[in-house]
Each structure stands twice: as structure tokens, then as C-alpha cells.
Image (tube, helix red, strand yellow):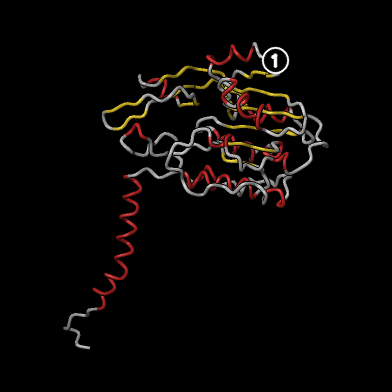
């Protein structure tokens, strides 16, 4: 080879090896531009126990909805006729006590009266009912209602005082006030001048659960806590309490497209629908009877 003749190989190598590098750099830049969804909160593999529900029961549950719903499916979880409730698949006669815990209960008719009392199959069993609700505007009605024990706290992973309420959705110069669905917010919400928040007592749900129920009890939990469910589920699995819950109805909140905000996807929960689906699937794979709640 003539040493003075230009060698085309370096240019070809530059193209071959440079293009993937350029693609990687563009991908990283895109990730910084658009905040990625965290993936660490859904990985239960290293934490998982295996719960009591056999695969034969899990396989009979209604299929999980894999595609993200583009409409607001208010009330779908409690209205869908195809839900396969656990008492319709197994006998409850061996259970000692029957307990229903409503996390994020709001008013009585929100889910206890409208769904659990009327639609959930109980095999003629009497359930102890606990309404967990931190919003003080709902407390009075529970104090006057027999058969329901009010726990006036926010369900959380430890006992502490938390900032509770709702932050607005801000898109550009426009601000949309959220419906008054309270959730645990950070300290920033207490100081931003826009959020409607108060300080409330939160309780360690795992500690309460392990102290108040036993494996021989039949425990049903509805969990609609505006994004806190991710931390609660991880804590339940990590501390070995997930299997105390025989049947879980959980709303997994994700950043969806909403009509209020010019069709943009809100960044309220920093969680995507695929992550929610993966969370439900992981729970079922570990033998937990869990249903999607809307």
C-alpha cells in the first residue's frame, strides 16, 4: 500500500462507530430534556415474598388492562362486572375474622357504601370496616355511623406529621386547581403559595396492619391514595406484610393526558402507565390477588 495514499478505513470506522455514539448522546440529551420516569420504585424482585394465593386462583382473575386508558375512567374499577372477586373463587369458612380497610375512604358513599357494602361478595360474613381518611371534612359522618371505625390519618410508611392536600397543575402561565383529592405532598408544597395543604398526622400502615390482623384473618384493602400507593406497596413487600392482605383493589396513579391542560401529559405523579401495569403484574406474579382500581 502506498503510504502517501489516503486510507479510507479510518473514515469508514468513524461512521460505523460514530453513529451509535451520536445516537447515545442524543438519547441522553433527550432524557435530560424530558424528565424520565423512575424505575426503581416498581422493582419488587429483590424484595418479593410469595403470598398464599395459588397460581390456579391468580389465573382466574380478570386480565390486567395493558393499554393506557385515554379517557378518564372514573368509577370503572368498582362498576366493572367482569371483576373476579376472591370470595367467588374460594371458600372463606376457614378464616377467623373478616376485615375491610379503605385507604383514602373520603365520604362513606365514595366506596364503602356504594361499592363494598353493595357489590362485594361476602359469603354472608360480617366484616369489620376501617375507613382511613386524613381529610377532616369527611370525619364527622364516620363518627356518627355505626359499623365503621374511622382512622383519621394519612396512610404512610412511618408515624409522622406530613404535608397533606393538593398542588395545582401548572402549564406555562396557566394554573389549574386540582379537585380536592388530598395526598401527601412534600415540604415544597407548603411554601409555594399555590397549593392547598395542611399538616396532618400520618401512621405507619404496615405497623398497624401487623398489629391488628393475623394470617388466619380474611383481609380486603382498597387503596386509592393519590400516588402514595407506590411507597406503601414497596413497604408492604419489603417488611413482609403484603401477604396479610388477601385481596387488594389499588388505583395506581400515573401522569395522564387531561382535558384541563391543553391535552398535555401532567407531571404530577412522575409515574407512567407501563410502570403501573408492571407493578400490578409483579404483585400477581408473587401470588397477590390484586385488581386495578380506577
Instruction: Report which quarter residue 156 is drawn in.
Output: top right
227 versus 192 height, above or below: below
- Choose between 105 and 63: the one closer to the eye: 63
- Give the crowd class for mark 1: few <14, some 14-19, many >=20 residues within 10 Å: few
Residue position for label 1: 146
- Choose between 45 and 141: the one closer to the eye: 141
Count of labels in the image: 1
Image quadrant in which the N terminus is located: bottom left
Q: Would residue 257 appear left or right of 131 to someone viewing this image?
A: left
Q: Would residue 245 appear left or right of 16 to someone viewing this image?
A: right
Which residue is situated farthest in the left direction here? 4
Residue 217 in the image, given as x and y percentages of width and height: 77, 33
Residue 48 in the image, given as x and y percentages of width and height: 65, 46
Residue 40 in the image, given as x and y percentages of width and height: 51, 45
156 versus 284 height, above or below: above
130 versus 66 height, above or below: above
Residue 137 in the image, given as x and y percentages of width and height: 52, 14
Q: Would residue 75 appear left or right of 144 to someone viewing this image?
A: left
Instruction: Report which quarter residue 246 is drawn in.
Output: top right
Question: Residue at coordinates 34% horizontally, 52% vertically from top-left?
Answer: 28
Q: Secondary structure at mark 1?
A: loop
Question: Residue at coordinates 76% horizontally, 26% vertically from top-left?
Answer: 126
Question: Residue at coordinates 68% horizontally, 19% vertically from top-left?
Answer: 148
Amino acid at each position: 500500500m502506498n503510504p502517501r495514499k489516503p486510507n479510507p478505513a479510518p473514515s469508514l470506522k468513524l461512521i460505523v462507530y460514530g453513529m451509535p455514539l451520536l445516537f447515545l448522546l442524543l438519547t441522553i440529551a433527550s432524557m435530560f430534556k424530558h424528565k424520565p420516569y423512575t424505575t426503581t420504585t416498581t422493582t419488587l424482585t429483590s424484595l418479593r415474598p410469595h403470598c398464599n394465593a395459588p397460581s390456579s386462583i391468580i389465573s382466574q382473575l380478570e386480565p390486567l388492562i395493558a393499554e393506557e386508558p385515554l379517557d378518564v375512567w372514573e368509577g370503572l374499577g368498582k362498576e366493572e362486572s367482569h371483576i373476579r372477586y376472591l370470595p367467588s373463587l374460594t371458600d372463606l369458612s376457614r378464616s377467623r375474622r373478616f376485615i375491610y380497610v379503605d385507604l383514602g375512604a373520603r365520604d362513606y358513599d365514595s366506596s364503602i357504601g356504594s361499592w363494598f357494602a353493595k357489590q362485594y361478595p361476602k359469603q354472608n360474613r360480617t366484616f369489620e370496616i376501617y375507613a382511613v381518611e386524613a381529610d377532616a371534612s369527611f370525619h364527622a359522618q364516620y363518627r356518627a355511623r355505626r359499623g365503621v371505625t374511622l382512622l383519621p390519618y394519612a396512610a404512610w410508611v412511618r408515624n409522622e406529621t406530613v404535608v397533606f392536600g393538593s398542588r395545582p397543575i401548572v402549564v406555562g402561565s396557566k394554573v389549574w386547581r386540582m379537585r380536592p383529592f388530598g395526598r401527601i405532598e412534600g415540604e415544597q408544597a407548603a411554601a409555594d403559595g399555590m397549593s392547598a395543604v395542611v399538616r396532618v398526622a400520618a401512621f405507619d400502615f404496615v405497623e398497624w396492619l401487623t398489629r391488628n390482623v393475623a394470617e388466619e384473618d380474611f383481609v380486603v384493602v382498597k387503596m386509592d391514595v393519590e400516588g402514595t400507593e407506590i411507597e406503601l406497596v414497596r413497604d408492604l413487600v419489603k417488611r413482609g406484610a403484603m401477604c396479610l392482605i388477601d385481596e387488594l383493589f389499588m388505583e395506581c396513579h400515573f401522569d395522564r393526558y387531561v382535558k384541563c391542560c391543553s391535552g398535555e401529559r401532567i407531571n404530577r405523579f412522575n409515574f407512567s402507565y407501563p410502570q403501573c401495569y408492571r407493578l400490578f403484574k409483579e404483585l400477581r406474579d408473587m401470588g397477590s390477588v390484586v385488581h386495578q382500581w380506577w
